[in-house]
Amino acid sequence: MNLSSISVKRPVTIVMMTLIVVVLGVISLTRIPIDLMPKIEVPVAIVSTTYSGVGPQEIEELITRPLENAVATVSGIDSLQSISTEGSSLVIAQFDFGTDMDNVALEMREKVDMVKGMLPSDANTPMVMKIDPNAQPIIQLALTDGDDLAKLQTFAEDTVKPRLERLPGVASVSVTGGYTDQIEIAINQEKLTGYGLTVDQIAQVLRTENYSAPTGEVKTGAQKLTIRTTGEFKSLEAIQKLPVSLSGGSQVLLEDIATVTMKYKDETSISRTNGKRSINVSMQKQSGTNTVTVADKIAQELEKLKKEFPEVEIVTVMDQSTYIKDAIGNVSNSAMMGGILAVVVLYMFLRNLRTTFIIGVAIPVSVIATFILLFFNDITINMMTLGGLSLGVGMLVDNSIVVLENIYRYRQMGYSRVDAAVKGAQEVGMAVVASTLTTVAVFLPIAFVEGLVSILFKELSLTVAMSLGASLVISLTLVPMLSSKLLKVDTAEGKGRHGRFKLFNFLYDAFDKGFEKVESGYRKLLAGALNRRKTTVFVAFVIFAGSLASIAAVGMEFFPASDEGQISISIEMPNGYELENVDELTTKIEGMLEGIGEVETIFSNIGSSGNSFRGGGSNKASVYVMLKKMAERERSTIEVADEIREMIKDIPGAKLGVSASNSMSFSGGSPVNIKIKGDDLDTLKKIGEDIKNIVMSVEGTREVKNSLEEGIPEVEIQVNRDVAVQYGLTAAQIASAVKGTVAGQTATKYRMNGEEIDVVIKGDSIFQESLSNLGQISVPSSRGSVPLNQVARIAVVQGPISINREDQVRITQVNSQVFGRDLGSISRDIQAKLAQYPMPSGYTYELGGDNQQMIEAFQNLLLALGLAIVIMYMIMASQFESLIHPFTVMFSVPLAFSGGALGLFITGRTLSVTALIGVIMLSGIVVNNAIVLVDYINTRRAEGEERREAIINAGPIRLRPILMTTLTTVLGLLPLAIGIGEGAESQAPMATVVIGGLALSTLLTLVFVPVMYTLLDDFKNFIKRKILRRKPVQA
């Protein structure tokens, strides 16, 4: 290789280039953003529409279906879902990962605009939004200060919000909770009817009188002045004295028919932090900014606020950056510890500080060079990129070990430093290039597979490839150059055996004696294996077959659950329950949670389901429990969640759910999700209940729910069209009269101190007291007012809570959490039981959730693994210039898979997406040892040695570098495999698979690969003889 020769001849150039890499790498590191995961654009867009006071079935018919028909024509749509609830329609469009969501959102808006005219005129305008992960708050605060929430809210709005919003990187700050002012107009229905007025007429007067607008220009000499007509209300008294015209031409003041007061809006939600009423402040960061940097700036400003306003307690309820910093720091520490262990192993083998330094320098320089490549490829430092560096840290020295060991061998043979450096590096140059290419090649298919797996692991793959590429260049440039200057060969026996640290001489002696026995034993074992080739193959097959049994015992899951120290409790009481009832139950649960030692903060939101799109209700609440850091508690988040679940399970009268926060759950739903499709709601409900019972009967399921639950009682006003037409009334006019009288309406806005306050016409509560009173509502018509019960029939019916649809067909969903068993085995048991269920004609079911995501991810990764093996074969065939000998090397791959399965089995970990990434990575690593061994066997045979002699000589010579590279990789991954600390759960299965596979395959490769080499060599010779024997004689 000319590269090594040039490096040895130009040492200053190599040193300068290395320094340039180090400087640029350090600069790049300071400028690379830090985040938890790679940038993921969620391929989901929604259309949200509200229509107050309308039931789910009417929402479905009037709003959802027209919007579904429009959105279904958007190009590239993968699936279409909708949820129709009381007063709300939500249409959810899902696309493939990688779709340009900006273009999608634009096209969806165009499609929705085309059907706006088909929607009810009094429905709110549909809002089209794409799901943006940056829209989620990065920090959430709770402000508490006695019981004066109004004062506290003013402080949050006027002081906290402006100071946080002006910080660089902060996109918006929202304040919720507390009390909101409104002007309430309480109509006296008797007087209103006596004057022949309606609520709609009062609302129209308020809107037209509270008006201000520019109305032209006027000249005054050479100057033009804008004309503005102002009629806005200046005071509460102006509203009270507002004249309302009557049909006879006379007028009546608003205060004569209504009471006008300034008061707080009725509470629809209550927030509490650690038992105290609180105001919530949430902060979103700007897209593309660094979460950790923005959060640090917010934290600095909060410290200033706490010092300036000590009477206000500011509690950080949630801070994304805390977990990010802990997780990133933990993985970084694992990588550094792995690097240290790798260097220690090197020293134990080399026993020389100079040689250890030459190889050890490959780790930091390779890592620093990788930061340059990350910066210019716009890749952040996250769990995946750091995971790639951690997985690769032990391998970064592999190439340098092989090169340096060969240079050292030539020095022992009497070559000068320069000659040994050039000749040693050139001899193994092609082998290290091929082994690096095979490792890098296995990651290429991951970058090209579709779906979430590619998005998540593309950066990990690129990071490993970049770092190994950098280590390859270093092994062929810096290592030969440093060897030509620093490498010494100790000929004295004692000095050669002992290192510089004399205190550990006894350890060195023990290590040397142990290695001598291993080397001697290996030589005998290798000779015996070559004599008994069939027995060797049979033993390897038995080991492989036996390890397959462990795969059946290893469960499957989508992603390992992360321990993030956050638990959420959902509370749902029967529909119709008042906010006070739910608050009482929530307070009781909060008191129970205070006795758990691991709990740090309890944040409750009563009147909310915790779902930003579905909204909440007075019968729902959410409790968020923040735990202490992992180092400060003995139990995991899941274990604490289990205790909470057991603690609250016997509370009557409410549906309770407990879940641990898990950022590694990407399905957006439950682990088990079964969708049943059909048309009739009653039939869907019955099937849903049957399947719910089936799922509940499977061991390992809990919190099983059917989305189509028992309907809620509702009052239905059925218009008698024959009678209504006689009064000149339509269904819409009757509905408007009822809504205005019962529910009231927001008529206009009143400006005060720079803020807009709702002016609300409050419905008369007397009509809500009974159905008979409801029937007495006066409906204005062309023939005068008419009671509601004369133009409509009033009845109480059962209405659905919500109507779910998928691909424009009604569905119900059965969801379940899992515990104690892996998702794969639970899903198989559910499928076996569902196969026996007599599904009615016209109704179908399918499994979704984490299980469906897991199956798709596994299929993509297995495809990537197949492509990786094909690419590896091509690279090795090119290196060996043989179609047969690559198979010799690749026989080490299935043995490695067996070791990976055994590793998962022994550690009790499941086969997940991250574990499969480890399998793919393993297939590229294990062949390296075999490549080096087979390449050296071929070299010795090319020099004239017989096949058996070449194998017997090559094996022991390559034993030391093979063991060195294996141990550095294994020990480099060991801290990651142990999986201690935040964020370690996602990387541990990968490291476990690689360690288990590499350990077993190395032991078998040293014996099995030479035997397979001879068998395939015999096969190649047999084929040659057959071809030569059949070759026709030339005339």
Image (spheres, grey):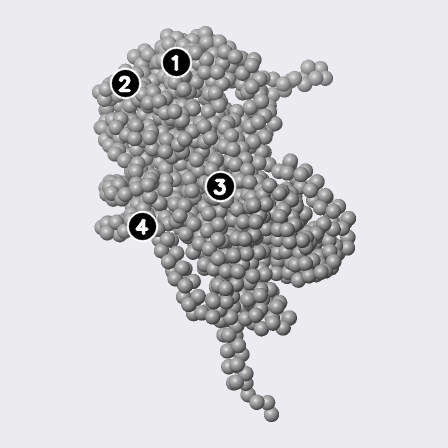
Q: What residue is disc 4 on?
A: 828
Q: What amino acid is labelled 4 in the image?
A: Arg
Alpha carbon separation for disc pair 4 and 2: 55 Å
Q: What residue is disc 3 on?
A: 42
Q: What residue is disc 1 on?
A: 185
| Viewer-nearest of discs 1 and 3 | 3
Alpha carbon separation for disc pair 3 and 2: 47 Å
x and y percentages locating residue 964 in the rendered image: 57, 52
Residue at image point 57% right, 49% down: 509
Judge left or right: residue 488 versus residue 120: right
Residue at image point 70% right, 51% down: 487
Q: What residue is disc 2 on?
A: 767
Q: What amino acid is labelled 1 in the image?
A: Ile
x and y percentages locating residue 939 in the rendered image: 62, 67
The one nearer the camera, 962 or 48, is 962
Judge left or right: residue 430 versus residue 767: right
Helix, strand or loop at label 4? It is helix
Q: What amino acid is labelled 2 in the image?
A: Phe
